[in-house]
Image (cartoon, rainbow, N blue to C red):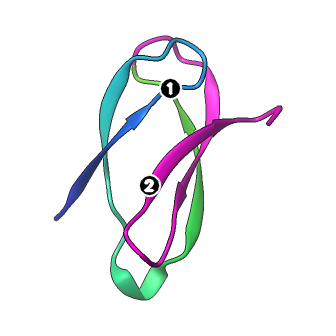
Amino acid sequence: MDFATVTCPTCFECFEVAVPPDDELPTELDYDCEICCSPMWIIFDIHGGVYAKGLAD
């Protein structure tokens, strides 16, 4: 299983998330920050890019 590092758009702390299998990409996951518990979307694209955005973004 692969992991990717994302940065919380609220507290700007970094944490790791598991990357879904290639056949499930692209996808967006509803996720809560592991540090500050703020809700966010984690975006996984088909080119291996992973980033987080706040729900208001």
Q: How many marks?
A: 2
Give coordinates of residue 50: x percent, y percent. 44, 54
Q: Residue 50 carries which label?
A: 2
The amino acid marked with disc number 1 is Cys
Give coordinates of residue 36: x percent, y percent. 50, 11
Q: Residue 26 carries which label?
A: none
Left or right, 19 with reference to 50: left
Q: Residue 8 carries which label?
A: 1
Please provide the residue range marked out in magenta.
Answer: 35-57
Left or right, 23 with reference to 42: left
Left or right, 43 with reference to 3: right
Q: Which image quadrant: the C terminus?
A: top right
| Residue for point 23% across, 53% down | 3
Residue sitting farthest toward the left: 1
- Element type at mark 1: loop
Quarter residue 47 falls in? bottom left
The amino acid marked with disc number 2 is Val
| Residue for point 16% across, 65% down | 1
| Residue for point 36% across, 82% down | 22
Residue 43 on the magenta span = yes
Quarter residue 56 falls in? top right
Give coordinates of residue 6: x percent, y percent. 39, 38
